[in-house]
DNA sequence: CACACGATTGCCGATGAACGGAAAAGCGAC
DNA sequence: GTCGCTTTTCCGTTCATCGGCAATCGTGTG
């Protein structure tokens, strides 16, 4: 804890400040930042000043501040996300070119799907995924693929929670989901019709890392009324293999049970 | 300044820690982190612990730490870079498809070009640009475009510095550069043969923001021996207009002097 | 022009989180 | 076992952090 009466460390406040910015609030006055974070006025100004000095925040002509270029740079330079994204992008473009709908790459983080990259969709389809956005595991094709390839104990902790039902096709019953996860694991892909938005279907496949573990899920969102949805699967599988290989994966070694059936 | 004997604020140390990670050192032990940052051992461990608690750093099985997923998420969600990147990506893909060499998007930051995005180049060309990487203004086509569209006082401060000569074609003479900048501003694009790497030429054009200022430079790197380099320019110009429009630019309003000649 | 309202900066005493040395506990490797 | 390394625990000192209060700046309003 920090010197603060409220008992927070500076790091905690730093997180609060950075969290105050999102795509709907990319910049704001320091006063508003204080309001959004709930920090005392003076404290906010002092801290913002420090951050400006280090260029973790940038001040724009109007006086508003936003996440600093330096901050983006440092994080991007050091983060492993960028490597993953760069490896995946060319293959995602291939998928995009063939499927013509939005293509996403997501990872499992804090019991949710975190979308690392997303391309496409000048299309009319409803797609609520955003880069650096999150969605629940049980209600997305990506999430189910990631969950299906997790340790079963972890699966149980997730299934034990209250699972929100977005549409009628959203599975929320643990035993149903358990069966479905097994199926996904066997088949090697997930197809979910309208589990979060009625009008669209998600298809997702796993992406493997060097140690043959699943590190991400590659997925597309297509209109639900399309009949031959499963026809999309091979493209995804092929591209996912490409990404996996770019990440250092060397084909299924021991312990790869998938093609067994 | 902080409680430290060395007289640094926590924010400063935070920056040191994050800066210690890059593409060559994406993860390391806490001890090595302490060594790289020059911070006292105990301090490093304490601070790293705080950062782990907030998930700004992640600990991996081996014990090594790396930039946390949460950190990437927060910064990406709030940063304006992502919006710029997303607006530009589809057009960059178009360029990429036509030109077949690596395409980059760079902005002006701290007297250097900071590359926001880069695609392409399974090709053989030497291209040293990296995402979140930096190169000097005077030695890149992107940099010269950005500089040419900056206030002349700023140009002078940059020209006043020692300009490193990477190859024989790198311009380092202030007066020569000044002439060249004027030309770039007039023509609306920059073509630089082998200014930083002998074998390749860079071509760059400006990208405009809503207020008709230059916010970024779109560029490609092609083999130098290619004869019809200027033939690449129109594609770039067209794509740059596309990006500009996606950013809210509404065509050249008052004060647009470029087509005058 | 005076006024109100909000954002921003300056001041300052009290407090406790941050600091970092030292030493001990793990952990391999030879 | 013993060396070399990383990591953790302990603890007294201290100064940066904290945040209330008030002054100042900036902008729009009656």
Image: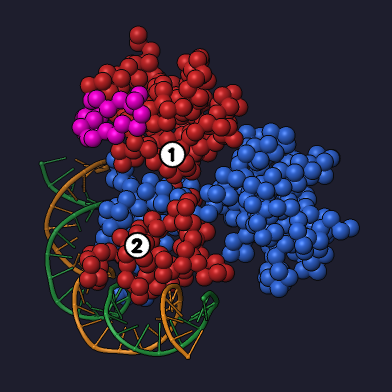
Chain colours: A blue, B red, C green, D orange
Q: Is residue B136 visible?
A: yes
Does the magenta run of residues contain B167?
yes
Q: Residue A5: name its quadrant.
A: bottom left
- In which quadrant of the rendered image does the C terminus of chain B lie? top left
Magenta stretch bounds: B152-174
Q: Residue at x 42, y 28 (%)?
A: B198
Q: Residue at x 68, y 53 (%)?
A: A249
| Front-most of residues B76 and A213 | A213
Relative to B228, is D19 above or below?
A: below
Q: Residues within 10 Å of mark 1 (few under 14, many from 20)?
A: many
Q: Is residue A32 left or right of residue A171?
A: left
Instruction: Give the image location of residue A154, x and y in percent.
Output: 68, 70
- In which quadrant of the rendered image does the N terminus of chain B lie? bottom left
Give the mark count: 2
Q: Nearer the viewer, mark 1 or mark 2?
A: 2
Relative to B128, is B148 above or below?
A: above
Q: Is residue A134 left or right of residue A16?
A: right
Mark 1 — residue? B115
- The image's mark for residue A204 is none
Callout 2: chain: B
Q: Residue B37: name its quadrant.
A: bottom left
Q: CA distance from mark 1 to mark 2?
A: 25 Å
Instruction: Give the image location of residue B260, x and y in percent.
Output: 35, 10
Instruction: Give the image location of residue B154, x and y in percent.
Output: 24, 32
- The image's mark for residue B37 is 2
| Front-most of residues A176 and B36 | B36
């Amino acid at each position: 804890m920090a010197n603060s009466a409220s008992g927070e460390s500076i790091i905690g406040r730093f997180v609060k400040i950075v969290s105050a910015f999102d795509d709907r609030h990319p910049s704001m006055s320091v006063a508003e930042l204080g309001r959004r974070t709930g920090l005392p006025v003076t404290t906010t100004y002092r801290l913002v000043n420090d951050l400006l000095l280090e260029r973790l925040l940038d001040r724009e002509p109007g006086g508003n501040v936003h996440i600093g270029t330096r901050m983006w740079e440092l994080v991007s330079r050091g983060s492993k996300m960028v490597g993953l994204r760069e490896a995946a992008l060319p293959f995602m473009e291939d998928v995009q070119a063939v499927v013509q709908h939005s293509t996403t790459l997501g990872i499992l983080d804090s019991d949710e799907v975190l979308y690392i990259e997303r391309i496409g969709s000048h299309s009319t389809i409803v797609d609520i995924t955003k880069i650096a956005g999150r969605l629940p595991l049980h209600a997305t094709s990506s999430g189910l693929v990631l969950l299906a390839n997790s340790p079963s104990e972890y699966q149980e902790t997730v299934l034990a929670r209250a699972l929100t039902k977005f549409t009628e096709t959203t599975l929320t019953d643990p035993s149903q989901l358990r069966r479905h996860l097994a199926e996904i694991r066997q088949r090697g892909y997930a197809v979910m019709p309208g589990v979060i938005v009625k009008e669209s279907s998600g298809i997702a496949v796993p992406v493997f890392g060097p140690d043959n573990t699943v590190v991400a899920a590659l997925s597309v969102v297509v209109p639900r009324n399309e009949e031959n949805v499963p026809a999309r699967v091979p493209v995804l599988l092929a591209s996912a293999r490409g990404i996996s290989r770019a990440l250092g994966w060397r084909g299924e070694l021991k312990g790869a049970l998938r093609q067994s059936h």
